Amino acid sequence: MKLASASVEVVRLSLSTTFRTAVRQADTISDIRVVLRTDTGLVGLGSASPTPAITGETTASICSVIEDFILPRLKRLDLSDEAAARAEVQQAIVHNSSAKAAVDIALHDLYAKQLGLPLAKRLGNAGHSPETDFVKKSLITGGIDYDGPVIKLPEGLGLGVSISNAEGVHGG
């Protein structure tokens, strides 16, 4: 199985609620989408969101690393060897974890499709929704004094969120 083509696309997404952490806040995010197409017709999808304040990676750096360092190495490989393909991604360049993760998840998606499995199942989810555990707000917000809602409970509960420890969570 060979890589027939690959594309990298940047999409700008608006958030319905401002996302706040100790180091930044955002009303929009960039999503860098990776599409890998094989000569056997399989298509693998992956993505990354740049967070320069945390990872040091920008939209431009993630796109450059994928296009200039990772994809040229994958094009030379037989992707049938999953371990070799995933190792090649990691060895293409040091650091750049977001760029590597976007391609790595696209490869995982390819291999899941090759087995006829949903990606989540291949990665170990046996079909149940993961239980969400809320922690103290100081852990969520990085220790800053924050009085806003961590999650709007009525909306969150409608999405299947279960609350096992709601300490520090403000209802809204």
Image (cartoon, grey):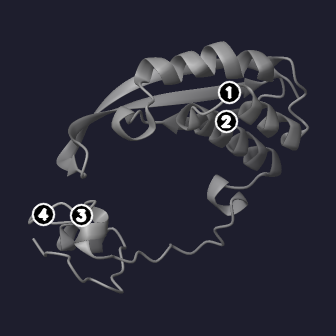
Look at the numbered disc 4 and give the secondary structure of its residue.
Answer: loop
Reply above or below: 97 against 140: above
Within-10-Å neighbours for mark 4: few <14, some 14–19, many 20+:
few
Judge left or right: residue 12 versus residue 17: right
Q: Which residue is mark 4?
A: 145
Which residue is rendered at x = 86% and y = 43% of the image? Answer: 83
Return the disc, 4 or 2, that comes first in the chain's sequence.
2
Look at the numbered disc 3 and give the secondary structure of its residue.
Answer: loop
Which residue is rendered at x = 65% and y = 37% of the image? Answer: 106
Q: Amino acid at mark 3?
A: Gly
Judge left or right: residue 82 versus residue 121: right
Residue 142 point in image, percent of width and height: 28, 60
Q: Which residue is mark 3?
A: 143
Quadrant where the image shows the N terminus: top right
Q: Which residue is mark 1?
A: 36
Q: Are marks 1 and 4 in contact (CB under 8 Å)?
A: no
Residue furthest bottom as drawn:
164
Quadrant of residue 122 within the rendered picture: bottom right
Q: Which residue is mark 2?
A: 44
Reply above or below: 144 against 156: above
Reply above or below: 98 against 134: above
